[in-house]
Image: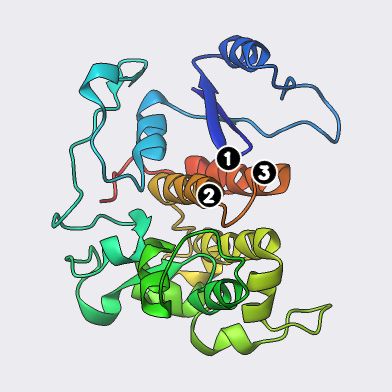
Amino acid sequence: MHVTLVDAKVCYGASQHALQTYLASKAIPDVYTPGPGARAVVQMSDAQFVRFKNAGKQHATDPMNVKFAGAVSRVRPDRTGNAALEKWDVAAYGDLTGRAGPWGGGPHTNRDHVTAHSSNVMRWNNGLYPLHAHSQAELKNVAPAITVSGRHHREASWTYGGRTKTIVVGTTETRMEYGAFHPDASVRLEFDAMLGWKADPNNHSSGNPTIRVEMVGAYAYLYKVLVNDGVTTASKQTDDLVLHYLNVAVLNDDGVVRK
């Protein structure tokens, strides 16, 4: 399977030619054209693609529109409501709370807002946050979030706890302010921090990267949700960032499905 991202949309084909044909049918520039404008393309197995494409999603596949990746079905069960969470589930923050966490209870499983809740509050106070809320508490619950390991969140997140008060290099703004006034750049920095920490072998006792196909797939889905909700806008920069980490995950994949 050949996979790329175009404005937060996952585009794929069973071969290079199939992907090119699809992109041409949608009037999307040829991603294989050499040069600085070329988009990255990641090649993976059908099974890896299904793990990537289904990641982060809790709603069931529409039975009237079942899609396949080669011989591998992409059918998903419904896990919304009170079902236990899986690693890297994506939803409104309030839909991720009060449910069993995949890494364990309490501090072992966290729900990470992107952008940070404090940044969202600043945008909301200025009438600029795209999702409707009557209060800061409601805002916290309706904003997009992703289920992450507590350790991963504490050690890697760009905006965990007091880090929101850190001044962004080259600016006079805190990370909280940066997320409010520059949400597109902040989303990339938050993605890069979380995915990059997993990709760096120096952060893990095994000495190997622990970035997973499912994890990158969930962040790709979160990116799409953020764009659809108006929290951020799609860009080639963000597309390429996610594709970079997808390639790293595929190259280091051990074939084990992590749920």
Closest to the observer, 44 or 125: 125
Mark 3–mark 1 CB contact (< 8 Å) = no
Q: Residue at x 53, y 80 (%)?
A: 118
The secondary element bearing badge 1 is classed as: loop
Q: Residue at x 62, y 88 (%)?
A: 165
Mark 1–mark 2 CB contact (< 8 Å) = yes
Vertical order, 135 against 230 (above or below): below
Closest to the observer, 52 or 135: 135
> What amino acid is found at the position of numbered circle 2 in the picture?
Tyr
Q: Nearer the viewer, mark 3 or mark 2?
A: 2
The secondary element bearing badge 3 is classed as: helix
Label number found at residue 240:
3
Q: Position of residue 184 (x, y in %)?
A: 67, 58
Going from the N terminus, do you reach mark 1 or mark 2 first? 1
> What amino acid is found at the position of numbered circle 1 in the picture?
Ala
Q: Residues within 10 Å of mark 2 (few under 14, many from 20)?
A: many
Q: Residue at x 63, y 11 (%)?
A: 25
Label 2 belongs to which residue?
A: 223
Label 1 belongs to which residue?
A: 8
